[in-house]
Image: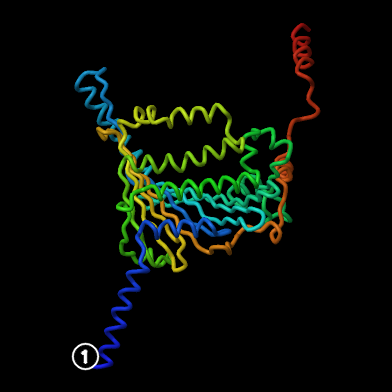
Amino acid sequence: MLSKPAFNLLKLVVLSFILGGCTSITPHESLKNALNKTFDTTGYNYTSSTRITKIVFPKNETNTTSEEEQTATEKLSSLYVQKGISVLRGFSFGLNGAVDYADSIKSEATYDFHYNRDNVETSIKLPFLFDYSTKTLYMGKTFLNTIFPMKEEDEGKLIRLDLNDSFITTLISEESMKQFDEDKVRSLNSAMKEGTLKAFSDINGSYFKYTPLTSDEKLSGSIQKIHISLDRNQSIKLVLTITDAMIQKMYSESILSKEIYGSYMFLSDPKQLTHLMENVNVRFDFDFGINAKGRIALVESLINASDKEEKFALGIENITSLNNFNTPHFTLDPKSSGSIDYMEVFRSWKEFFPDKTPTDSLPEEEQISDYEQNLTI
């Protein structure tokens, strides 16, 4: 017979087991809840990196040369292709920034074009801040500051481009300008939320599973990881569901023309899609890291696509981390650093490099006539 302390301990163990079983949720439900919470935030900071993991091109199968010449040509062609592929694999595209939807929408992004291979590392960064309420784009310091030198008193200021400027509006089409409307941006974000939630909700729960976290994933703030591996049909369905939600909303907001919308509806038709995709293999793999507050802290995605004969293959990896939910931090601040209109930068550039056209030279016609006159004397 159990003693009273032992009996009480047994009750606690049984109670914990029962409560744990009642409160545990499936990976499918856990991800849906995390997506909802993440989309409902008013802003966040993000870091994203994309790179090519695999690339295969079809071999040249032409037979227009002799066997010996063809072999030499193929070897040379193959060498250049492999070298080109090696260079491509050394490139990555980074995107770091912040988004704030609380009051007026602000979006900051630093585009990082990075190369790192064979002891060569180089990076070009372009920082931008866009204020949707005023339709103003600010550019931080880049290599362009060297090409277009600024006056000493303007050093450190952001370069300001007002999209309402008459010159800029002539360069940007009317349809493109609609994408910078604050209400339309909120509407598109809502469509993205609806499409993403529906896309992952429609996937069978058997595709979802909990997996252990790596040390790097724990550092991102994740306490739980959900892995999803989708086959060809599920991958295509996921893309179409999200894309369809965005296209329908963009068309209803008059951002897309009837011609573009009609082309999309034609290509997304099941009959057309089956014909277009019958020779394509595609597979999506996702790892979602969820933080202690139930939001998405990390997304690792891998896309592999190829034709059925695998003469062409492409693999793309993206790793995105999210943090500072509802309290995003911005590195570009026009109020504290000040800003200068882009036209002022061009005027400064012209001052540094003035037009050196001589003013005392004779018109070309007079020069020729004098020359001809001298010849006749």
Residue under the point 72% across and 47% down = 341
Relative image position of residue 19 (x, y in whole percent): 35, 73
Residue under the point 60% across and 48% down = 186
Q: Nearer the viewer, residue 335 or 354?
A: 335
Relative image position of residue 226 (x, y in whole percent): 35, 59
Residue under the point 48% across and 48% down = 113
Above or below — where is 194 with respect to 73? below
Corner quadrant of residue 268: top left
Corner quadrant of residue 275: top left
Q: Quadrant of the C terminus?
A: top right
Above or below — where is 156 with respect to 351? below
Location of mark 1 (residue): 2
Kind of residue indicated by mark 1? Leu
Callout 1 secondary element: loop
Is residue 56 something that shows in the picture?
A: no
Residue under the point 35% across and 67% down = 24
Relative image position of residue 103 (x, y in whole percent): 66, 57
Relative image position of residue 235 (x, y in whole percent): 36, 43
- For label 1, count other residues whose C-alpha is less than 10 Å away and answer few (under 14), some (14-19) or many (20+): few
5 relative position to 145: left or right: left
18 relative position to 115: left or right: left
Q: Quadrant of the N terminus?
A: bottom left
Above or below — where is 194 with respect to 367? below
> Which color scheme is applied?
rainbow
134 relative position to 277: left or right: right
Q: Nearer the viewer, residue 344 or 10?
A: 10
Is residue 147 something that shows in the picture?
A: yes
Q: Nearer the viewer, residue 161 or 211?
A: 211
Above or below — where is 109 with respect to 88? below
